[in-house]
């Protein structure tokens, strides 16, 4: 059985379940006794040991009601009938079938004798048999004397939870908290059923809302106050969000300004570097034209002048002849030349720089003799 008509809470493997009677008994759109019985049998066959049947109904067919009553009374498991709104007419009789009978503190119990629907006729003997059956059902649980049972099946009798318990129709009154419907016993059964049904539907939604809001047994006023508080908090959050967005926009503008400034600095640095190079190039080219330095040392002089223009100017100011230009040129490149010639032998010196070899003979005789002796040994 996959789809249930009356089982509201069943999980395979658990030993408790819930069912409901929240329609009229019988009729085209009402509760069918046979289907109800099959679902009760399904629970028993699947290991359920206890079932709670919630009741809110204006009553209906005695025949279908007998089937439902018997299904509950004869079920091979523990049954609790629980009136959560109105148990009227045949629904009231069904409420007596449970092993335990519970009524909520605001709920109502209603009873009357068999009634014949408008436009139909029923033999008096059959009505008397039905009445006898109803008396037996009530007497089985209430221990009311026969005359009191007869009174409950004469006319229309509407009892509050307290009155119904006092007469033995229920074992327990379940005290509720939070919202309660305003039910008056002088209303018609149809009106009472509509009131209780609307309340249960709305209360179910309020219960869901209470669960979402994490409120236990909250009244409607408490729920509304909590919602208003949440709305106010949401307004504050929205305000903070707007402030954050404004601050973010402002920060992004500042970041853009900083990036633009950094780009400008980079541009200025590039311009300054170019100006330094131009000034250095102009200085060195003029020094070459005046004979202060040689053309072949131009690149080294420009690099030095670019790094420190004033020091280079000071250095060049002391140069007045081409001879000194040669000496300074040699000084600038001396390290580079020396590094290149460290590996030269006597023959290499003679081929590449005989004048340098001559200077070595005059200025560094030990190095000259070492190179010469090595050459002789080879």
Image (tube, grey):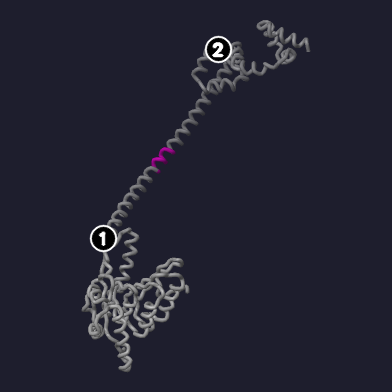
Residue 180: give x, y in percent of width and height.
25, 68
Q: Nearer the viewer, residue 67 or 210?
A: 67
**In this rendering, the label closer to the viewer, 1 or 2:** 1
Can residue 103 be seen in this snapshot? no
Per the rendering, the mark at residue 51 is none
Compared across the picture, whether 28 is left or right of 165 comes to right
Q: Are marks 1 and 2 in contact (CB under 8 Å)?
A: no
Q: Residue at x 25, y 75 (%)?
A: 164
Disc nearer the start of the sequence (1/2)? 1
Helix, strand or loop at disc 2?
A: loop
Q: Nearer the viewer, residue 259 or 291?
A: 259
Q: Quadrant of residue 188?
A: bottom left
Question: Crowdedness of circle 2 by 10 Å Cα count: few (<14), some, many (20+)?
Answer: some
Query: Is 23 colored magenta in this rendering?
Result: no
Q: Which residue is under mark 1?
A: 222
Query: Residue at horizontal 32%, vertical 75%?
Result: 56
Magenta residues?
Answer: 252-259
On the image, the x and y values in percent for residue 323 come to: 61, 11
Q: Nearer the viewer, residue 328 or 27?
A: 27
- Residue 19 shows up from this direction: yes
Q: CA distance from mark 1 to mark 2?
A: 99 Å
Q: Quadrant of the C terminus?
A: top right
Specify the label residue 319 is tagged with: 2
Q: Measuring from the top left, give residue 94's x and y in whole percent.
A: 33, 79
Q: Position of residue 261 (x, y in %)?
A: 42, 36
Name which residue lies at 27% across and 70% down: 173
Q: Is residue 327 left or right of residue 375?
A: left
Q: How many marks?
A: 2
Residue count near mark 1 (Cα–Cα under 10 Å), binned few <14, some 14–19, many ≥20: some
């Amino acid at each position: 059985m996959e789809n249930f008509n009356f089982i509201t809470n069943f999980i395979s493997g658990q030993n408790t379940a819930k069912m409901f009677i929240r329609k009229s008994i019988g009729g085209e759109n009402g509760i069918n006794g046979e289907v109800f019985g099959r679902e009760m049998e399904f629970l028993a066959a699947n290991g359920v040991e206890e079932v709670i049947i919630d009741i809110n109904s204006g009553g209906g067919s005695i025949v279908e009601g007998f089937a439902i009553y018997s299904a509950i009374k004869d079920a091979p498991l523990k049954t609790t009938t629980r009136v959560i709104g109105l148990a009227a007419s045949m629904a009231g009789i069904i409420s007596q079938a449970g092993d335990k009978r519970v009524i909520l503190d605001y709920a109502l119990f209603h009873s009357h004798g068999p009634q014949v629907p408008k436009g139909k006729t029923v033999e008096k003997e059959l009505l008397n048999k039905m009445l006898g059956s109803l008396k037996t059902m009530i007497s089985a649980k209430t221990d009311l004397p026969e005359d009191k049972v007869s009174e409950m099946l004469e006319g229309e009798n509407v009892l509050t939870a307290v009155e119904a318990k006092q007469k033995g129709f229920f074992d327990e009154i379940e005290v509720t908290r939070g919202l309660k419907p305003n039910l008056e016993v002088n209303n018609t059964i149809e009106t009472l059923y509509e009131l209780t049904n609307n309340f249960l539907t709305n209360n179910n939604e309020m219960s869901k809302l209470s669960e979402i809001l994490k409120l236990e047994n909250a009244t409607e006023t408490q729920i509304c106050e909590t919602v208003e508080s949440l709305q106010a908090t949401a307004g504050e959050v929205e305000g903070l969000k707007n402030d954050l967005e404004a601050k973010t926009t402002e920060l992004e503008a500042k970041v853009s300004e900083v990036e633009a400034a950094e780009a400008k600095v980079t541009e200025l640095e590039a311009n300054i570097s170019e100006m330094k190079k131009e000034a250095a190039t102009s200085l060195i080219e003029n020094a070459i034209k005046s004979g202060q330095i040689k053309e072949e040392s131009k690149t080294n002089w420009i690099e030095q002048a670019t790094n420190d223009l004033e020091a280079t100017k000071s250095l060049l100011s002391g140069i007045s002849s081409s001879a000194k230009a040669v000496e300074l040129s040699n000084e600038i490149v001396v390290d580079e030349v020396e590094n290149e010639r460290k590996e030269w032998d006597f023959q290499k010196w003679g081929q590449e720089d005989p004048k340098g070899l001559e200077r070595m003979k005059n200025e560094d005789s030990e190095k000259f003799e070492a190179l010469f002796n090595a050459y002789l040994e080879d």
